[in-house]
Amino acid sequence: MAYKTRTGSLDAYEKGVIELDDDLRKYAFSNVFEVAGKAAPYERVAVVQNLEYVAEVVRADGDSPWYATPHDEFAIVMDGEVTFRFVQLQDDQVPGHEGGAVRLGAEPNGPRMGRVTARKGHQVLLPKGAAYQLSSGSPSVVLIQTGDGPETVKRWNDICVLKEA
Amino acid sequence: MTVLDATIERLGTDDATGYTTFQLGSFTFRRDEYFAHVSWPKGNHIIEVDRFLRAMVRDIGWGFFYGWIFFDDVFGTTNHYGTVDVFAGSYDRGCKEAGIDHLETFTADAVSEAFTTISQDWISEGYDPLNAPLETGTPIGPKGAERTDPLLRAFIAADRMLGLPGDKPVRSDASGFPVNRAFADLDFDTPDIECEPGFEGQLHAINLFDHIARSDVTWNPSISAVSRANICCVTSEEHMLPVIHGNDRNEWFIQLSDEIHWNIADKNTGAPRGRIEMKAGDVCAMPADIRHQGFSPKRSMLMVMENGTPGLEQRYASGELKPYPVDFG
């Protein structure tokens, strides 16, 4: 038997359904492609929150600001192609806040480490100690496993299913 | 909570079927050709043997996972991270009202040894309860030849990220993990990594979908990336989750491919709350006050985000933390 795998994209996704005798806000049901489709480029919109940890959806289009974090992050490309550029930070440049990404004013002055170009299904390490910038020639979607930080955008009322269809 | 100092005991072997009957504490476990029978001083319970074994091997492999693992509405375990409750009817309204519910607490090692011993006796060659039903034989019938390959496959748990030097490897043809038949239509490429001189080996990326597509087991997550206690698990799912999971904390599902249908019920009573149908790209929290069971019509890819902070289960149980994850303001 031949199988057809469905992965979804910005242009073609089908949202599921939630039918519960319960407050739907408890389930915070959303869709990464829908969230990215309505986001400005490089807004980091939380779709997962586990206390101090989040997963952010990013619509990658053009060049992002430079970011750094006090911990590792991991990015998964859900649609399109995204290039991640890395610059090594000196110890005193590594941000000391609790967690999540902070935006840097410009490319740091450290040595360039290289770049990773990732496509759908690829997972990229955004290591502590490196600043990074995302670039994409066309709208793409990235899911970032990170901490709840100053760049995290929360608009749960807008992105979540609040009533049964 | 009294922790019983008990270990698994063999009570005897059935001459007709060849299967051994076991006792752990005051629970006895017997199987026949079709069913597992669990008995305790106040009651008896019957479970279809395929479902029982699929649940049992996962419960061991997961290290009893987070919170409650219901083999069905009546029988299951609760993880207290060092000790484990084995219960019958403790979270079933009918059993509670009839007064036949029963719960005993053992060391995790004792339950793990007991479930491993039972599984090894009750599983014969040709049947692998970690495989999808279409990919393995049947457990029904009398005892057959003993399996010689590994019966249990625990979590593959990356320390930082799969594929990093010194960390757990990604699956590949070379390591004996071909792409599963259900993902044969996908093209898998590798990320392009270009390091500047002096930074060779310091950048890292993998094809995560390729890793998931090569999983030889279902409903058996592997940890792909960890930062502090922020844990990303991935798993391939086909047919039905053979347990009903009641988490002791909030967790999140991100559907990476295809679809999974989840039945949702109240954790304490089992009363149905409804259903959730997740399609590729959907994100949904599983609150800490529910139990859930998934059904995947086609093999699919699922990501699970967990907060592994030690002691979190006590903060939820005490009411310090709400059983749902998001404050809508």
Image (cartoon, rainbow, N blue to C red):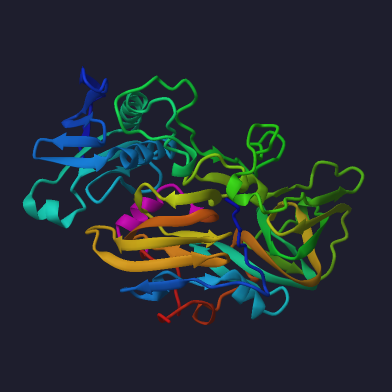
Q: Is residue B14 visible?
A: yes
Give the camera-side residue of B99 and B119: B119
Whether B298 is drawn above or below B131: the answer is: below
Is B140 positioned to the left or the right of B23 in the image? right
First to last magenta residue range: B306-321
Q: Residue at x 80, y 72 (%)?
A: A138
Q: Is residue B58 above or below residue B230?
A: above
Image location of residue B84, percent across then percent down? 30, 38
Residue A150 lies within the magenta run: no
| Residue B15 relative to residue A149: left or right | left
* Quadrant in which the C terminus of chain A appears: bottom left
Residue drawn at 17 percent across, 41 percent down: B45
In the figure, residue A22 lies in which quadrant? bottom left
Coordinates of residue B115 in the picture (x, y in percent): 33, 30
Residue located 26% across and 20% down the image? B18
Q: What is the quadrant of residue B265 in the picture?
A: bottom left
Q: Residue pushed farthest front?
A: A1
Answer whether residue B316 is magenta in the image. Answer: yes
Is residue A70 something that shows in the picture?
no
Residue A51 versus residue B223 in the image, above or below = below
Percent position (x, y) of residue A67? 74, 64
Placement of A94 over or under B31, stated as above or below: below
Is B220 positioned to the left or the right of A11 in the image?
left
Residue ID at (40%, 50%): B241
Q: Is residue B320 left or right of residue A63?
A: left
Depth check, front residue: A97 or B282 = B282
* The furthest residue to the right: B197
Q: Nearer the viewer, residue B264 or A71?
A: B264
Residue B204 spot, x, y in % from top left = 75, 47
Residue in front for this viewpoint, B79 or B52:
B52
